[in-house]
Amino acid sequence: MAIQRLEHGAYLSTSSEDTKDFGALLARLLADGDVLVLTGGLGAGKTQFTKGVAQGLGDTHPVTSPTFTLMAVHDAGRIPLYHFDLYRIEHAFELEDTGIFDVLGYEGVCLLEWGERFSDELSDAYLSMVIERTGEYGRKICFVPHGERASELAEAIDELVLATMNDTD
Ligand SMILES: Nc1ncnc2c1ncn2[C@@H]1O[C@H](COP(=O)(O)OP(=O)(O)OP(=O)(O)O)[C@@H](O)[C@H]1O
């Protein structure tokens, strides 16, 4: 895997494959109840990353961003992946209709695009992942944990990246 470690919690991807592979690697660490909030503008790579997570969990069906359906379930892998795109949600009360409260925090892994706007309503335990464009192909990926489990996860991600880098040295 070619993802580069900039510092603890900050990584650099230089291709969409890198970003996908990073998702697949990270998927190994995910467990029921984990919540990941993906932040990044249009074309940042949130969908590429999600493709990798689905693959890493063992679901090989195609992944597209659920911009209009709001939620997609990928349940052919080790544990279900609930992929939400909250871009079109304007008010917190609309969240109820997405089905998010039926699964968030206890069943499968929830991956929320544009979820940071509703972080108060949604969960106090989540791993925030921020993707920032640094060029045409460059993406800086930073993790900010909220809660104990998210801190453990961020730590485990860092260790896994370090171990992977050592393997390929
Ligand atoms: N390092 C990189 N990581 C991820 N995608 C990259 C990278 N470099 C270039 N790309 C390209 O950027 C685009 C990212 O698209 P993607 O659909 O994943 O973004 P997104 O964040 O889901 O956007 P949207 O919110 O518009 O759905 C793809 O065309 C991909 O090939």
Image (spheres, rainbow, N blue to C red):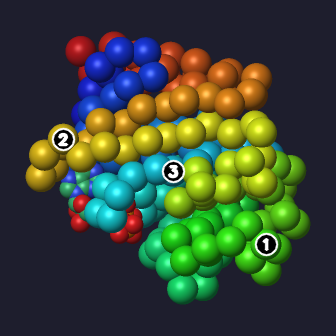
Residue carrying label 2: 134
Residue 24 visible to the viewer: yes
Horizontal and vertical percent position of residue 84 = 62, 67
Rounded to the nearest angstrom, the CA distance separating label 1 from label 2 is 35 Å
Rounded to the nearest angstrom, the CA distance separating label 1 from label 3 is 21 Å
Label 1 crowding class (10 Å Cα cut-off): few <14, some 14-19, many 20+? few
Quadrant where the N terminus sits is top left
Secondary structure category for the residue under label 3: strand
**Relative height, residue 151 to residue 123 (above, below):** above
Q: Nearer the viewer, residue 41 or 161?
A: 41
The numbered dot on residue 38 is: 3
Quadrant where the C terminus sits is top left
Q: Nearer the viewer, residue 10 or 54?
A: 10
Whether residue 140 sits left or right of residue 163 in the image: it is: left
Please say if the residues under marks 1 and 3 sit with CB atoms less than 8 Å apart: no
**Comes first in the chain, label 1 or label 3:** 3
Determine if the C-beta at disc 1 is less than 8 A from ligand 1: no
Label 3 crowding class (10 Å Cα cut-off): few <14, some 14-19, many 20+? many
Horizontal and vertical percent position of residue 46 = 42, 57
Which residue of the protein is positioned furthest toward the left in this rendering?
Answer: 136
- Could you tell me the amino acid type at mark 1? Phe
Secondary structure category for the residue under label 2: loop
Which residue is found at the position 79% from the left and 80% from the top? 97
**Comes first in the chain, label 3 or label 2:** 3
- Could you tell me the amino acid type at mark 3? Leu
Q: Nearer the viewer, residue 131 or 79?
A: 131
Residue carrying label 1: 93
Horizontal and vertical percent position of residue 127 = 62, 37
- Could you tell me the amino acid type at mark 2? Thr
The numbered dot on residue 109 is: none
